[in-house]
Amino acid sequence: MNDELIKIRDLHIEYKTNKGILGGTRIIHAVNGVSLDIKKGEILAIAGESGCGKSTLAKAILQLEPAKAGEIYFENQDTLKFNKKEIKNFRKKAQMVFQNPYASLNPKMKIIDTLKEPLKINTNLSDKEITEIVKEKIKMAGLDENCLKLYPHEFSGGQRQRIAIARALVMEPEFILADEPVSALDVSIQAQIINLLKELKEKYNLTFLLITHDLSVIKYLADRIAVMYLGEIVEIGTNDEIFNHPKHPYTKALLSSAPQLSKRKQEKIILKGDLPSPANLPDGCKFHTRCPFAMKKCLEHIPFDTEFSKTHKTRCFLYDNND
Ligand code: SF4
């Protein structure tokens, strides 16, 4: 049975930025040869430092960022070859929940109008039918239908994020990209939204791509985790494989900042230096400039993936048995 909703193959994303007072442009290599599957009904999280390319990758899946090369399949159709009409249809099935619920709702529109808008634009449903759908989705998001008469400023941050989630749900999507969905919220409210996302996944079999720097959110929500470094997936595995049996030195370093999330004993790993610029990628293994285990060949050659199980693999020479 083919259970992948999204398949990404050898995806590359580059963009140009100005060099500032020096003049000219430089090329940012944001995503470098990513291949990844997102299965129906799962929450796949992408973990990694800010600047690792996780948000760029996520936006490319929704066609909000152009790809330089590669393929992105949604239900076995190559979305990068879609025409305008096909993109419009695809965007009904793939929705996004933004980081900042304060900025993502129009302050001048009542909630009912905000939620009706995508249905009015994208369907031929009557106003009565649209209203029924809106009422159903606001309840799914954990709010009372009385809130539909109000404006965004009349809600707390957590309630606004529920409204933003309801707006994503009105199109009955199959896939939701949640980009830092709780990081702008008070800690006391974060758990409510995290539980809501889990409930939506479990009750309605929705598929999520979760982008966040918060490992405790990933630990609680994600079925599988892809660890990203300088535009590459360096390790991927189930929640248990990544948190309790990590293999890549970078994954271990990330987890050592949150030892309470893992069953294994781990020592604190402090990485050397900062994340290198994606405009100037290191040769060989891109992690070698910060890796405590770097060997001579890591500086010259690109490591390949080593599989530990059907679901767990990493890209590192430490597991190369061909020496
Ligand atoms: Fe470290 Fe070498 Fe493995 Fe890269 S390939 S993570 S530099 S040991």
Image (tube, helix red, strand yellow):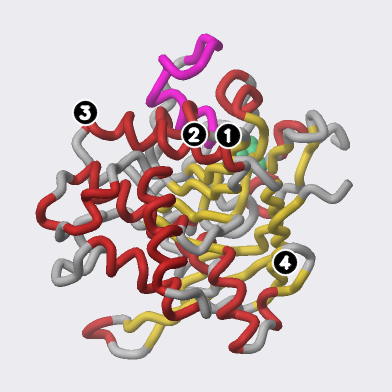
**Residue found at x 66% / y 67%:** 11
Q: Which residue, given by chain and number where applicable, does mark 2 sit on?
A: 199
Amino acid found under the numbered disc labelled 2: Glu
Disc 1 marks which residue?
202
- Amino acid at circle 4: Tyr
Kindly identify the residue that appears in the image at 21 percent across and 28 percent down: 188
> Which image quadrant is residue 231 in?
bottom right
Mark 1 or mark 4, which is nearer the start of the sequence?
4
In the rendering, at what x and y percent does residue 265 appear? 51, 9
What residue is rendered at 65% in x and 88% in y?
Answer: 83
Mark 3 or mark 2, which has the lower sequence index? 3
Q: Is residue 153 magenta?
A: no
Instruction: Work out whether 309 lies above or below 32.
Output: above
In three-dimensional space, the C-alpha distance between marks 4 and 2, rounded to whole angstroms, equals 26 Å
Query: Which amino acid is tagged 3?
Result: Ser
For label 1, being within 8 Å of ligand 1 is answered no
Q: Is residue 247 left or right of residue 252?
A: right
Looking at marks 3 and 4 on the same chain, the residue that comes earlier in the sequence is marked by 4
Q: Secondary structure at mark 1?
A: helix
Density class for disc 1 (Cα within 10 Å; few <14, some 14-19, many ≥20) is: few
Q: Closer to the camera: disc 3 or disc 4? A: 3
